[in-house]
Structures are given as structure tokens and as C-alpha cells.
Amino acid sequence: MSQLIVHAGDFKFEARFEEKLAPKTVAAFRKAMPFESQAIHVRWSGEGVWMPLGDLDFGVSYENHTSYPAPGQIILYPGGISETEILLAYGGVHFASKMGQLAGNHFITLTSGLENLTAFGKTVLWKGAQKIRFEEV
């Protein structure tokens, strides 16, 4: 199994793909790697940051989906009633949009650096958008 690194602002997190639980989402995301975006603070969902991706289509539907990702879990919302997005929970999250509750595919879990997760989330909240990059090493 390869190692996944998430560079988020000034922070670095090690992570793993949830290959057994979300194999189609993992495979689709791998094709887009290294993946770079901007993380902004969520508007309706609680303590999380998100990467709005507009009409980007990863070609997946729901698998291993949740509306309540735990801190350190990353979900992909494949689009539908709201735009495609990736969300990283750093605290309590109830995933939603202006259209109401959503569910996203839990496909990545952070495995190290979790002591910096809240600091990253608060940096995004108070200082604005932060660069984020996912890469396999």
C-alpha cells in the first residue's frame, strides 16, 4: 500500500485511502492525483473545510457515504443536488448545503498529524483559503 500525503496550508498529514470501503471513489481520485485545490471553511456543515469543485465529475456514485464524517475523515460528494466537493472534517460535522443534508463518500482517513487538524481548520476559518495538495509517495 502506498502512502498518501496531504499538504494543507502549513501543515502535513499522512493518510490512507479507504480502498475496501470506497474502491470506485479511490480509483477515480487516484486518476486525478496529484490533486490540488483550495480549502475554504464550510458554510453550513460545522467544523470542516471544503474544496468546491463545481461540475467536476469523478464518475462515481454513492459508496461508503455519510453525513457525519469524524475528525480526520475526508469525503467526496459526487454532485447532484449541490456541486461536487471534497470535505475534511476537523471537528463535529453534519454535512449539508443550502439544499439541505448531503452525504459524501468517505474515501480518505488522516493517520498522522491529527494534533494539528483543529489548528488547520481554524487557520482556514480566520485567515481564509489555504492551498491543499494530495499526493502518493
Image: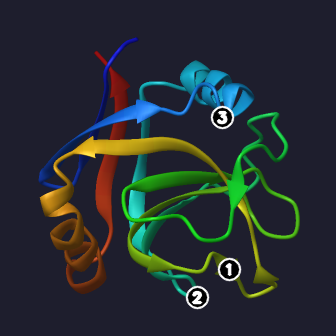
Circle 1 Cα neighbour tier, 10 Å, few/some/many (<14 / 14–19 / ≥20): some
**What's the residue at 33%, 48% (across, down)?**
132
Q: For residue 14, which quarter of the picture?
A: top left
Residue denoted by label 3: 21
In contact (CB < 8 Å): disc 2 and disc 3: no
Q: Earlier in the sequence, mark 2 or mark 3?
A: 3
- Circle 2/circle 1 CB separation < 8 Å: yes
- In the rendered view of the protein, which quadrant contains the C terminus? top left
Badge 1 is on which residue? Answer: 96
Q: Nearer the viewer, residue 55 or 8?
A: 8
- Tell me where residue 31 appears, x and y as whole percent: 60, 19
Q: Is residue 59 above or below residue 119?
A: above
Q: Which mark is residue 44?
A: 2
Give the mark toward the camera: 3 or 1: 3
Q: Secondary structure at mark 3?
A: loop
Q: Secondary structure at mark 2?
A: loop
Q: Tell which tag, 2 or 3, sits nearer the viewer.
A: 3
Instruction: Decide which of 10, 90 is in the foreground and name it.
Output: 90
Q: Is residue 72 above or below residue 48?
A: above
Q: Which mark is residue 56?
A: none
Residue 108 percent coordinates (x, y): 48, 41
Q: Label 3 amino acid?
A: Leu
Disc 1 marks a residue whose amino acid type is Ala
Q: What kind of residue is marked 2?
A: Trp
Residue at 39% over, 62% down = 39
